[in-house]
Amino acid sequence: MTETPRPTPAPSLTGGPAIVETDRSALACVDIHKSFGGAKAVDGASFAVPEGKITALIGPNGAGKTTVVNILSGAMTSDSGVVTIGDQDVTRLPSYKRARLGLIRTFQLSRELGGLTVFENLLVAAKVQAGESLTNIYFRPGLVKRVEAENRERAAEILEQYGLYELRDNWARELSGGQKRLLEIARAVMAEPQLLLLDEPMAGVNPVLIDRIGEHIFDLKTAGVTVLMVEHNLNVVEKICDHVIVLAEGRTLATGQMSELRDNKDVVRAYLGGVLDGRVDS
Amino acid sequence: MSPLVYYLFTLAFFVFAYCILGWGLNLQFGEGGILNFAYIGFVAIGAYVTGALSLGKPQAGSGQTYIFGLSLPFPIGLILGGLAACVFALLVAVLTFRRLRTDYLAMVLISLSLVLYDVINNFVPLFNGADGLTNVPEPFADTLGLDPNTFVPFFAGVTLVIALIMWWLMSRITRSPLGRTLRATRDDPEAASALGKNVFRYQLTAMLIGSFYAGIGGGLIIEFAGAFNTSAWLPGETFLIFAAVIVGGVGNNKGMILGALIVPVLFTQLPKFIPDIPGHPGLILNIAAMAIGVLLMFVLWFRPQGVIPEKKRFSRLPAVLVGRRSGSTQQSAPLSTEDTL
């Protein structure tokens, strides 16, 4: 089992340790289609997410971003097309098998496990779980205890990094919207992702917390995690994303760096009037 | 033995048996989120298989026909009865769990319960049809020379021991990471799956273990009563056990003890021992059934989490770790209310 390096705090969004970047694709989709009844949500989208980078998936409302994320994570199957993680074709793999390959996601609306405490939300995400086996529960309690102790220590470290440590014994359902966003990302980190899909991580979050979430995402990149995030806030995209994919009407409209895309007429047109200097829609 | 003491031991037996039944349903519904409206069917399978394995070959002219008839001693027949419920649960889960969730699954399961009821009621060679099984031997009665007066307290004690073992086995599961993962699949199967959890596998585990408990509970009831027929497991009986789980506290095994005491025993078994009101046969039992409905509405309205709610599992970090945390300088500032609007 490969161990993902743990995130280390980055000084700010603009600074941080030097990062070794490669152009190898960590995740890719080729010509994926998805229709709901007669409506085409995704209509031949193709793109690659470069390894070790933060990639933004942007586009106007109804562009098919969340559907693409659902297809990439395995929550939804595409009507046609191919999805690969590294060199492996995962098109038909269910989401839990993709998660075991290191692809972890968060959701557009926070999906905290409300009947578990904040601490348990992290513990349940741990990759190694000796105590999920009945044989281990009854016949190897020592192993279960040891693994659980390791997971507890790691969960406490992550909660501390995300400023949620003091809330560890609260029911997750009792958290505020911003805290739930942080919890979801912290939980994803606990799962030791190699690839992280974040579906609008800044949605409904105040500016102070947006900066903090941005720092955490940047920290993940420094730790070697590839990030693909759906984001409407273009200031955030400009600050932390290395690469941008623009979707419109279910197709890939353009890819590149944000500075290049600002001058792309197709992209500007797709944003209904070309508001590309801030938040594109509410 | 005075009739009152005899009744009290009888009620004690039902408390212990319903605790076992309730713990099984609590694992499925309270921990795993499976709305198993066919639960009483698994109880019945456990009861019939235990009874048919404990009985000898059906005698010509006895008026009973049934399968097995192996005269197996206690507790082998009981364990096999539990396993038979497990096998049935496996079939049901494989056929339904991959495609159906929550309310649709519940509808299929209640239909299944009705089908099972009709099959056992009408297919006489299986378990003697509507007449059911009778004269099931009382465990150890011959060996220990027990008469009906001494068998009841003896078997209530045996059931207590079995209930304690089942409690210990269940506690190990609900307190373990497996229990935590089951609660995660209950709260949000899609989010659990996105974390690498095979939801089908965990819900199947809950279904099998819960059904084993149902089968054992059913087996104990037929061993105690010596008889079991379709009037004992009308599909509506499932809701009696659900009511016990809801009143006691969903997801809390201690709450289930209270639930078993209140609903199936005080509201169902106890009224059976109250003499009928002259001229109004069955009125007391009907009032008791209505009282359960009122109780359920009362609990759902005023205390939906049950009398003893689901327990919060505190982080309980080792002291060394707590010290290190409080002395740490690298942590992010805790979120203020302002940060988290």
Image (spheres, coloured by chain):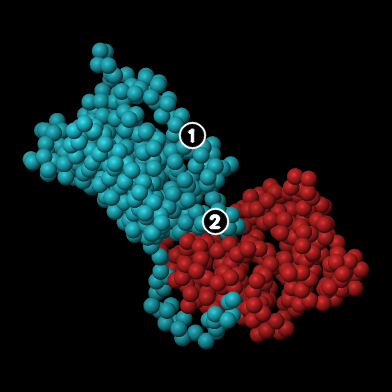
Chain colours: A red, B cyan
Q: Quadrant of the C terminus of chain B?
A: bottom right
Closer to us: B12 or B295: B295
The image quadrant that residue A222 belongs to is: bottom right
Q: Please say if A44 is above or below A231.
A: above
Q: Is residue A67 left or right of residue A264?
A: left
| Image label count | 2
Which of B161/A275 is in front?
Answer: A275
Q: Is residue B300 left or right of residue A63?
A: left
Numbered disc 2: what chain?
B
The residue positioned 82% from the left and 52% from the top of the image is A44
Q: Position of residue B155 (x, y in %)?
A: 19, 40
x, y (%) of residue B192?
Answer: 55, 57
Residue A133, horizontal then vertical, whole percent:
45, 53
**In this orientation, which residue lies closer to the viewer: A2 or B179?**
B179
Q: In front of the other: label 2 or label 1?
A: 1
Q: Residue furthest top?
A: B61
Amino acid at circle 2: Asp
Q: Residue at x 31, y 46 (%)?
A: B291
Residue A136 visible to an observer of this rendering:
no
Q: Which mark is residue B111?
A: 1
Q: CA distance from mark 2 to mark 1?
A: 25 Å
Residue A129 shown left or right of residue A8 in the figure: left
Residue B283 shows which numbered tag? none
Mark yes or no: residue B132 visible.
Answer: yes
Residue A30, position as x, y percentages in the image:
80, 53
For badge 1, the amino acid type reads Ser
Q: Residue at image x 34%, y 54%?
A: B248
Look at mark 2 in the image and give the residue it sits on.
B188
Q: Residue furthest front?
A: B279
Viewer-side residue, A272 vs B53:
A272
User: Could you tell me which quadrant the N terminus of chain B lies in?
Assistant: top left
